[in-house]
Image: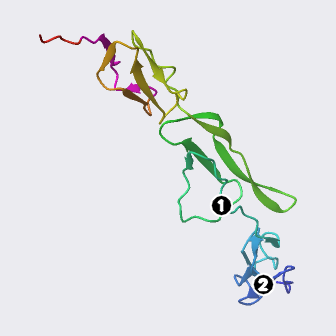
Amino acid sequence: CEELRSPALGTVTLTGRLFNDRATYSCELGFHVVGLKERTCQADGNWSGQAPVCKQNVYCKNPPHIDHARHNALPEQTTFDLDATIQYQCLTGYVTNGFPRAKCLAIDNAASWFGPDISCEPRSCGAPQDTAHGWHAGECYTFGCRVVYHCADGFELVGRNERTCQTDGTWFPKDLPACVLSFECDYG
């Protein structure tokens, strides 16, 4: 078989140029072989396949950070091949809005993440009920927020005076406190 030339930014190593001898291609640091890494001298005196080329390594680094979300990539993974896809999920107590995937793509020989296009909003419990002869203080009705109940003059609070919005979108405790008429007894 004929002598082979090394690809630009790479080398070719021959075991010989006779039938069944092999040519092995490699690339410089920061580049990789595109095509056959190995070719064989055939009985007809030609090398199998086409000569490969060396292309610059293109990959994505750490995926984008999204507040109140996690992704399914391993924490120790810092580089991602082209076409790698990562799925995002909002943390407990948050609702996913938008497209939860990111993909590593290359444009003009530079890799970057496209997506995700999401936001993680705190789950809402809705406005809590007021109790008869009382009211609640607090205007935040999403996961982690608290409201405090108060009674009108002449009434006394029975039950817990505080409720908290839970991860599942419900208030805890479930039962409302009550405002009951307070009496002062005269001992005389």
Q: Could you say where residue 82 lies in the image, as x and y percent from the top left?
A: 71, 58
Q: CA distance from mark 2 to mark 1?
A: 34 Å
Q: Where, by quadrant of the figure, is residue 146 drawn?
A: top left
The residue carrying mark 1 is: 62
- Residue 118 placement, left or right of 182: right
Q: Where, by quadrant of the figure, is residue 152 drawn?
A: top left
Under mark 1, the amino acid is Asn
- Number of marks in the rendered image: 2
Q: Which residues are magenta?
A: 169-183
Q: Residue at image x 18%, y 11%? A: 185
Q: Could you say where residue 184 lies in the image, as x and y percent from the top left?
A: 23, 13
Residue at the extreme left: 188
Under mark 2, the amino acid is Val
Residue 113 badge: none
Q: Where, by quadrant of the figure, is residue 166 drawn?
A: top left
Which quadrant is home to the N terminus?
bottom right
Q: Residue at image x 71%, y 89%? A: 15
Q: Give 70 or 136, whichever is nearer the viewer.
A: 136
